[in-house]
Every structure is written in structure tokens, then in C-alpha cells.
Amino acid sequence: MEHTTFEPGEKVVRKDGNRFFRGDKVQTVGRVSRPEDGGRAIVWLEESKVWHYAEELFKANEVIKSIIDGVSPDQPVVYNEKGGGQSKSPYRMDLVDPKSILEIASVLKEGAEKYGDDNWKLISTQDHLNHLLVHVYAHLAGDESDKHLAHAACRAIFALGVELEGE
């Protein structure tokens, strides 16, 4: 993706080197300052109330296509036996157990209330894996004081999320 110019009202996300800040919310461009001397343009982001250099930002729709493989308008079309066409999906979300996901979401809610939203992003992969193993062994030992398997699943998701973000 090449650097582009921005206009007020456009949706953008930040970028640092080759890494996108996937956890960041999409921001709205408020104002743009383009120096007449050819210097670095800066962009005011409404939600975070800060200025950012334009080269650190990308249009949200361009970044989202590059972050989630297999989910974009450019996906090939496949047809079912009745002739119905749709985008080809590399995912089988229908195989995810809904009761397990709801149990994980319950643990996430408790954790967010206790530690704050997205606190898990501030913890290393190794610490997440350590806590995952503690919960697994507590479950194996017969401890019923907590939802150990749901906590272990959360820690696995957190470890993967931190790893994908590139610590």
C-alpha cells in the first residue's frame, strides 16, 4: 500500500513500520495540515484527539482487506448445486461450538470487568501460556473453583492474539 492523502471524514488506521495496529479502532480524520514547504503532512484523529503523521496512516478499507485473509470483495465466487453464487470462504465458522464460545465470552466479560478491556494485550505470550497451563493442570487435578477450561481457552486465544500482533 502506498501513502495517500486524506480528507476530513475519511476512516483510517495507524501503521508502524510493516505492522498494522489491528487492535486499534478505526479513526476518523478531522483535519489535515499540509505544509507548503513540502514537509510532513499531519492528520488530526477525532476519536483519540491526537495528531499523526500522514505516512503512519492508511485508509481503513485498504488495511482491513490486507488483515483478514479470505474476506474481501476480491474473493473468487463459488456456486452451490442449486446455482447459488457467493464468495469463497477459507473458514468453517459453522464448526465452532457455540456453547464453548459463549463460555469463553463469559470469562472475557469477567476479565474485562476486573482488569479492563484489552488488558490481555499488555501481557506477553509466555505469561499467557503459563496461565493457560495453570488452568489446564487445575482442571486435571479436579479443582472446581473456577471455569478452568474456559480460562485456558481464553489464554490460548490471548497468546495467539499477542503472537499475531508481533509482541
Image (cartoon, rainbow, N blue to C red):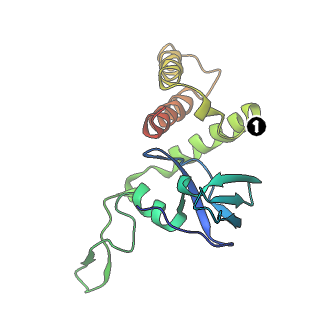
State the residue lying farthest toward the front: 37
Residue 3 image offset from top left, x and y in percent: 47, 62
In the rendering, at what x and y percent does residue 133 appear?
47, 19
Picture coordinates of residue 59, whole percent (x, y): 53, 65
Q: Position of residue 46 (x, y in %)?
A: 75, 61
| x 57%, y 41%: residue | 104
Q: Is residue 116 left or right of residue 167?
A: right
Quadrant location of the N terminus in the rendered image:
bottom left
Furthest residue in direction left, as rendered: 81
- Of residues 25 and 48, which is closer to you in this image? 48
Residue at 25% from the left image edge and 79% from the top image edge: 80
Decide: is 24 above or below 34. above
Furthest residue in direction top, as rendered:
141
Image-based side of 68 in relation to 148, left or right: left
In the image, 86: left or right of 157? Answer: left
Q: Amino acid at mark 1?
A: Glu
Using the image, determine if residue 57 lies above or below residue 61: above
Classify mark 1: helix, strand or loop: helix
Label 1 neighbour load within 10 Å: few <14, some 14-19, many 20+: few
Q: Quadrant of residue 40?
A: bottom right
Could you say which is closer to the camera, residue 18 or residue 102? 18
Residue at 58%, 58% in the rendered image: 54
According to the image, label 1 marks what residue?
113
Quarter of the image where one finds residue 5: bottom right
